[in-house]
Image (spheres, helix red, strand yellow):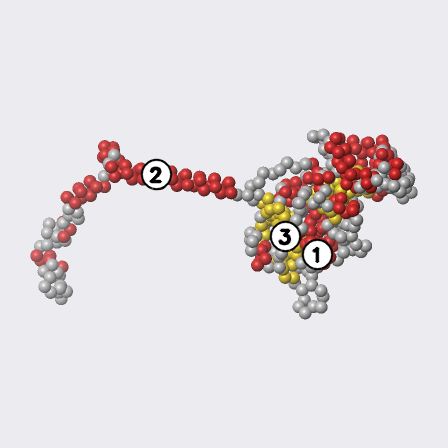
Amino acid sequence: MSLGAEGDPSSGSMAARRAAGSTPCGPGGSETVPLLISGIASNSRLHLAPMNKKELLSVVGSPGWRKLHALLGSLFWVGWLATVGVAIVVIAQSPNPAAPRLRWWQKAPFCRLQAALFLDSGHTGARAINEVRDRLPYLRNLGVGALILEGLFPRGLPAPAITKLNESLGTLLQFQQLLAEGHKTDMRILLDLCDLDFRDSSTLNSSDQTEESTNPVLTLLVWRDLMRNLSQEENERILVVSKAEETGPRRNVSDPVGNHSLVDMITRAFLPWSPRPLSAQDVAVAMETHLLRPQREWPSWTVGGVLPGELQNILMVLLMTLPGTPVISYGIDISPSQVRRRPGHSDSALFRSLSQLRSREEALILGKLTFLSLSNSSQTIPGSALPPSPPTLAFLCSWSCTRILVLLNLSPDIQRLDPRGVRSLPAAGVFLLSTGPGRLGSCVLETLQLQPWEAVVIKF
C-alpha cells in the first residue's frame, strides 16, 4: 500500500522511484545537489580570511579608528589621574600623626621598692641594699625601666645630709655599687625624698619660720633647677611628685593645672585609700571616675588602695594599658615569690606580657583614651535578691589607624556584651592578652563572653 502524500509529486513509494529509474545517489537524486553554492562559499572564505599588513594599516589609519584610539587613551589617563588624586586625598586626610619623641621616663614602667623589705629577721647585716642590687636583673627582665627606692634615709634627716643613709640598710659604698649595677642593666634609680626635712636648719628650732622655709612650691623650684643643672642629654634627671589625697596647701602642690610645670611627672593613686579591702563596686566607681576625667599632662598611675585578690590582675591590666607611665609596688603587685593562683599564670608573668605588649603597641602609650559605656547582660539567677553585679568597664586607646579595646569584668558572673553597645566598633578583632586561658586568635564581639574577674585586650 502506498503511503505517499496526495498532491506532492515528490512523494511516493520507494518502488515507484526505482521503477522510474531515479535513485537517491543517482544523477537525478537529491544527494547529487551541492550543499553550498560556489559563489557563497567563495564569499565566505573571503570574509573569514585574516587581514594582511597592508589592509590592517589602512584600517588603523582611518579617521574613525584614530578618534576611537584617542578617546580610549584619554579615558584611561583621566581615570588613572583620578585614582591617584583620590588616593592622595585619602592618605592626607587619614589620621596618621607622627609619633612624638618619648623621654626615658615615658617609655617603661616604674617600680616602687621598700629597701627594708630585704632586712633579715634580726635587722642586722646591713645587706638590704645588696639584696636590691641582686634583684635588678630580675626587674629589668620583667620590663621595669626605673626603680624608686623608698625608706633609704632616716626619717627627719635634714636635706643637706642626704649622703647619710639608713645604717640598717647598707653603706654608701653599697649604694654606689647599686648605682653601678643599675647602669649596667640599663635601670634608672630614683630616690624617695619624702622622709627628708627640707626646712632651713636655722629655723628648725624656731617658731618664726619664713615662707621660703615652709612653702613647698619654692622647694620644688629649687629641686627643679638642681635637676636641670645635673641633667645631660644622654642622662636626664627628673623630679617626680606623688599626689596624696589630703587637704591643706600641700594638696595644691601637685595640682596638675597650676604646678605641673614644676615637676616632670605626677603620680596619682587610682584607688582611694581605705583601711579595708575595697569591694568590686568601689573599684568600678573609682575606675569610671578616673577614666572620665580629662588629662592635661603626661599621666602616671599607681594602685593606691587595698584590693581583694581576685581584682589584682584586673588592676594590673588597667594600669599597664592606660596611656602614661604605670608605677607598681614590689611585694604587692609583683614579687618573685608570689603564689600562682592558676597553673602557668602568675602576676610576674602577666606583668612581663603587659610590658612586652606596651613596647609593641604605641596606642597603649600615646593613644587617645575613650571611655565606652557598654550595656551588658550577666548570666545570673532570675529573681535573685543579690545586689547587681559591677559593670563591665571598657575603654578604647586610639592611635593612628590602630584601636585597642580593653574589657574588664569586675563581677563573679559571666558577662556578655550587648551588640547595641558595640556598634561603633568593628565586628571582629584579635586577642592580644587575657587573664584567662584559651584566648588566642580572632574574636567576634557579639559572641564574646567574659569569664568572672577576667580582663581582655583586643586589637582592631
Q: Locate residue 166, reporting x and y percent.
A: 87, 38
Residue 158: quarter of image: top right
Look at mark 1 in the image and give the residue it sits on. Answer: 285
Q: Please tell me which residue is depicted at 23% across the width and 34% down the height of the picture.
A: 58
Alpha carbon distance from label 2 to label 3: 51 Å
Name the amino acid type tagged 2.
Answer: Ser
Look at mark 2 in the image and give the residue it sits on. Answer: 74
Residue 281 shows in the view: yes
Q: Earlier in the sequence, mark 2 or mark 3?
A: 2
Alpha carbon distance from label 1 to label 2: 64 Å
Q: Locate residue 159, reporting x and y percent.
A: 84, 36
Q: Please tell me which residue is depicted at 33% across the width and 40% down the height of the picture.
A: 72
Q: Nearer the viewer, mark 1 or mark 2?
A: 1
Q: Please tell me which residue is depicted at 69% across the width and 51% down the height of the picture.
A: 290
Q: Is residue 93 left or right of residue 274?
A: left
Q: Is residue 151 left or right of residue 59?
A: right
Tell me the crowding category of disc 2: few under 14, some 14 to 19, or many 20 or more residues within 10 angstroms, Cα based.
few
* In the depicted structure, whether residue 311 falls above or below residue 147: below
Look at mark 3 in the image and give the residue it sits on. Answer: 371
Q: Is residue 210 left or right of residue 448?
A: right
Name the amino acid type tagged 1.
Answer: Val
Q: Please tell me which residue is depicted at 67% across the width and 66% down the height of the picture.
A: 381
Q: Locate residue 186, reporting x and y percent.
A: 73, 34
Q: Earlier in the sequence, mark 1 or mark 2?
A: 2
